Amino acid sequence: MVKRTSFEGDACPIARSLEALGDWWSLLIIREALFGVRRFGEFQNKLGMAKNILAARLRSLVDHGILETAPASDGSAYQEYVLTPKGRGTFPILVALRQWSEEFDDRPEEIATMLVDREKGRPVKKLEMRAEDGRLLTPAETTLKPRPSSRRRSA
Amino acid sequence: MVKRTSFEGDACPIARSLEALGDWWSLLIIREALFGVRRFGEFQNKLGMAKNILAARLRSLVDHGILETAPASDGSAYQEYVLTPKGRGTFPILVALRQWSEEFDDRPEEIATMLVDREKGRPVKKLEMRAEDGRLLTPAETTLKPRPSSRRRSA
DNA sequence: GCCATTTGGTTTTATGATGCAACCACACAA
DNA sequence: TTGTGTGGTTGCATCATAAAACCAAATGGC
């Protein structure tokens, strides 16, 4: 079996995340879901993707506990796809991707939207990494430590 | 042409990021590069991936300005792949992916490592979103605004 | 209640991407 | 100069993706 390699058993949490949302469409589906999109056709219209792969992705996201199907909300007999807490938890990932693009994109003038603080209408600050005590950390000021009571493949 | 859809012209900064690092391996290559990996063979050993696709990914990352080739560092005639500032700028994305996994993974005991503050050895705090004035923001307290002087596709 | 249309998919088929193994050129070492 | 490790490329088999056709159930119009 040649199969596209899976990171499911991998001990690295980054690889594990990518297992669930590392393909081309999943994060964009989640993005739409965060904007309130719930119906199959609505995802299909907004994203312009083939219906078969949309169906496959939705199924995969449900399997990974990121979306769940709800029996309706407007009385219709159709079902809806809504984010679970795990799904809503991807928000910082999307913000990080967005900010990276805003900061480093070669043609920033092509970017259509800004993420702003709703109250003031001002751009959100860059995500920053802080220590437990609140000290601002650079990548170099961090390091990886093996987890307590766990002896597995490195990362 | 059926071509795997490209997000290159898309106006959404998230799609634009995914264009550069949305495949299975790119972020893992960057992860290794952040740990100091520079040589082809070293990437290949650590990631256990096929050499042809490693070569393709490295080329793509160089094309996107995330890595650049440097003529050596230990006197050898071989070349090295080093992160550009744009490449190092992906750090928050990796941290966000890591924290998502730490918080929501179904089998957290399989995760081998923790990201810690090097000085104190304590886990890094969760990334948080703040307004310009420092107020902590929830996703619901943010919204998207069209960029000044730019009129393109939505989302 | 009946028919046309919309919604939410599945199936089929073509093509691109991935994975593995074999191969090869160059650097370096003896 | 012969050998070995590094850094790839090439071919081939298989998998994933994309587009379009198809289809059943739900809905809307009358």
Image (cartoon, coloured by chain):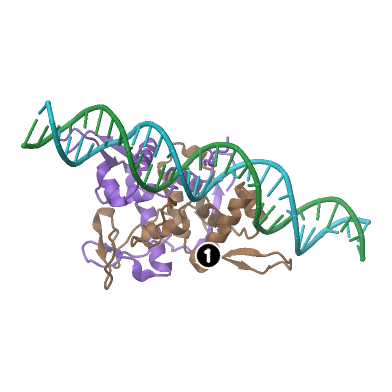
Chain colours: A brown, B purple, C green, D cyan
Q: Residue furthest bottom?
A: A149
Residue visible at 40% across and 42% down? A104
Q: Position of residue A90 (x, y in %)?
A: 47, 60
Residue B133 in view of the camera: no
Q: Position of residue D12 (x, y in %)?
A: 44, 38
The local secondary structure at tag 1 comes to helix
Which one is nearer the viewer's eye here, B8 or B57?
Answer: B57
When asked about the image quadrant of residue A32, the answer is: bottom right
Q: Is residue C2 left or right of residue C12?
A: right
Q: What residue is pinned by disc 1?
A: A63
Residue visible at 38% across and 42% down? B53
Q: Is residue B118 above or below residue B91?
A: below
Q: Is residue B49 left or right of residue A42?
A: left
Q: Is residue C9 above or below residue A69?
A: above
Residue B108 in view of the camera: yes
When asked about the image quadrant of residue B109, the answer is: bottom left
Q: Position of residue A62 (x, y in %)?
A: 55, 64
Q: Position of residue A71 (x, y in %)?
A: 67, 69
Residue visible at 52% across and 40% down? B6
Binning the other alpha carbons within 10 Å of mark 1 as few (below 14), some (14 to 19) or many (20 upward) gives few
Which one is nearer the viewer's eye here, C13 or A147?
Answer: C13
| Amino acid type indicated by mark 1 | Asp
Q: Is residue B109 left or right of residue A50?
A: left
Q: Is residue B49 left or right of residue A80?
A: left
- What is the quadrant of the C terminus of chain A in the image? bottom left
